[in-house]
Image (cartoon, helix red, strand yellow):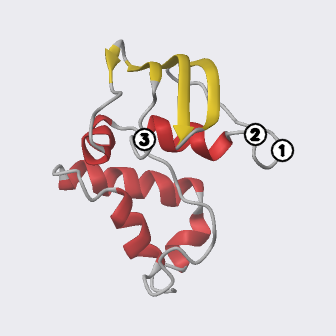
């Protein structure tokens, strides 16, 4: 479970997040919706450790993650897909999918997960070599 409690984040003297609280339970899908400048990206960047909250708590399964390095947060299973279609334009579809599993060491489980993704999105299996 992911939980934010009264998170405040600043860019210099400008407060970007003010007392943001939310809970996403296991199995739930949450969406942040709002106007430009509402704090959606800042919220995600704060959860992922790119921005440090000035105050408040970010908990993953009850354990604080505020202050952890982004790569440590990714290893816990928290990540985001950057917006934009050309983030890694020179990588194939397969290389992009494999990049998402980069920190994992369990190759058999990664293959199983890829097979599952291909069962959900069969067109991907046909496009694995396409950039």
Residue ID for mark 2: 38
CA distance separating discs 1 and 2: 5 Å
What x and y, as percent, mark residue 55?
46, 20
* Disc number lying in front (3 or 2): 2
Q: Is residue 99 above or below residue 19?
A: below
Q: Could you say whether the residue bearing mark 1 is in a helix, strand or loop?
A: loop
**Nearer-the-camera pick, 112 or 58:** 58
Q: Are marks 1 and 2 in contact (CB under 8 Å)?
A: yes
* Residues at marks 3 and 2 touching, judged by CB atoms closer than 8 Å: no
**Disc 3 versus disc 1: distance between alpha carbons?**
21 Å
Q: In this view, does 54 lie to the left or right of 127?
A: left
Q: Name the residue under label 3.
A: 48
Q: Which class describes the residues within 10 Å of circle 1: few (<14), some (14-19), or many (20+)?
A: few
Work out whether 94 lies above or below 3: below
Percent x, y of residue 42: 58, 42
Q: Nearer the viewer, residue 70 or 88?
A: 70
Instruction: Identify residue for label 1.
Output: 35
| Residue ID at (43%, 70%) | 96
Quadrant of the snapshot with the N terminus: top left
Label 3 sits on a secondary structure element that is loop
Which is nearer the N-term, disc 3 or disc 2?
2
Q: Is residue 7 above or below residue 91?
A: above
């Amino acid at each position: 479970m992911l939980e934010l409690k009264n998170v405040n984040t600043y860019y210099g003297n400008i407060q970007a997040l003010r007392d943001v609280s939310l809970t996403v339970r296991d199995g739930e899908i949450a969406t942040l919706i709002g106007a430009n400048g509402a704090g959606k990206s800042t919220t995600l960047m704060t959860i992922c450790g790119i921005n440090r909250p000035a105050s408040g708590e970010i908990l993953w399964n009850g354990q604080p993650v505020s202050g952890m390095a982004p790569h440590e947060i990714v290893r816990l299973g928290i990540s985001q897909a950057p917006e934009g279609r050309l983030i890694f334009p020179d990588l194939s579809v397969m290389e992009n999918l494999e990049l998402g599993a980069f920190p994992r060491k369990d190759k058999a489980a990664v293959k199983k997960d890829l097979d599952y993704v291909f069962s959900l999105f069969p067109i991907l299996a046909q496009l694995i070599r396409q950039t």
